[in-house]
Image: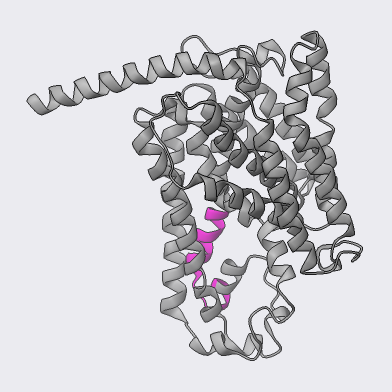
Amino acid sequence: MTTEGLMVASVLLVIYFLLNYWTVGLFSKANTFITVFKIVIPGLTIGALLFVGFHSENFTSGTSIAPNGWASVLTAVATSGIVFAFNGFQSPINMAGEAKNPGRSIPIAIVGSIFIATVIYVLQVAFIGAVDPSMIVNGWGHLNFNSPFADLAIALGINWLVLILYADAFVSPSGTGITYTATTSRMIYGMEKKKNKYMPSVLGRLHPIYGVPRPAMFFNLAVSFIFLFLFRGWGVLAEIISVATLISYLTGPVTVMTLRKTGTDLYRPLRIKGLSIIAPLGFVFASLTLYWARWPLTGQVLFIILVGLPIYFYYQAKAKWKGFGRNFKAGAWMVVYLLVMMTISCLGSDKFGGYNIIHYGWDMALITVVALLFYMWALKSGYETEFLEDAKKKINDELRASQKEAAAKKNKETAA
């Protein structure tokens, strides 16, 4: 990214910050507009390409599906932004504490976000049919589009669509920027909140009027600037963020199944069936996708995460190592898991950047077995913490009161 590009990106970071600075309402209104834009424009693009030029023979042209093998396809899933594109389902979860009816709204938001993203991705197959057959005489590998849909629109003479697509290239990512500014700030706030104390106490403060974690937002803005000027481009950032996101996925299956064991009497407005099957499968697929990200990227990102351990030790020392032994024993599986995954990635197939000591096919079988072993270790390590004990009382009381209030309001409306 050029110096001018960095300056523009910096201004955008500040805009995203300000949209979240005042209230959740302002963030919500801006995000709603951008979300509609993100759905309408891909649909308009797909429709225009299908209408102006569609060549069905492109789907049977010359080569087979993935003529160079599936390894590059799997790597693309892990690092090209596909994981990042589907990551929108996390935002409703992170903001669930502010939902009026989480039992209804969370499933709709999660399933809806994944479904819409899937439909849009599938419909983008229109790109294949819209390409002029003369451009793929020597194979699809010879296509060289910097901005595939915009370049294709230029080739087809759809000038109005070109302008819209370039505008969308700015507007759509802004929705992600605004949302992540909100959710990340709340995660930082949660790391300090009350008894966690894994961050400076100032980051656990909420604005008394707007209820926004402003100190956490300032911290998030500073880290955003560091990453922007350190990596200086979307390509590198997408790879690193995607791999880091995959690692965060690993904790989800373990956490939910541990809570099923330790929080049996915890009141919950939403309960998902079949988690005993979904959770281990999720852990395995997250592990496989992490491996597909290729060495040395996997090693670099895992090393960055392990660097966070000194920060953890610092705050444990401030707390005089209270409960450290039990907590570290419960979380040791993750440290060992990251080291094992780093080793397998290094020794794995050369198709995924490794030294080919563990050959293609066997590497993924090994990852599957290792992932299941670590999953079982993680579940056995879980225990009922003091945080869960406090949460049981608070959540049970608050949610029951909220449910009664909602029921009373509904009865009143029905009577009216």
Q: Is residue 182 left or right of residue 343?
A: left
Q: Where's residue 208, x and y in %?
A: 50, 9
Q: Reply yes or no: does residue 264 show up in magenta.
A: no
Q: Is residue 216 left or right of residue 321?
A: left
Q: How would you classify the magenta stretch by its main secondary structure?
A: helix
- The answer to which quarter of the image holds residue 333 is top right
Up-down: is 14 above or below 162? above
- The answer to which quarter of the image holds residue 21 is top right
Front-lying residue, 272 or 81: 272
- Magenta segment: 153-169
- The answer to which quarter of the image holds residue 336 is top right
Identified at 54% across, 85% down, the residue is 59
Which quarter of the rendered picture does the C terminus lie within?
Answer: top left
Q: Where's residue 199, x and y in %?
A: 71, 18
Q: Where's residue 86, x and y in %?
A: 55, 52
Identified at 70% across, 51% down, the residue is 287
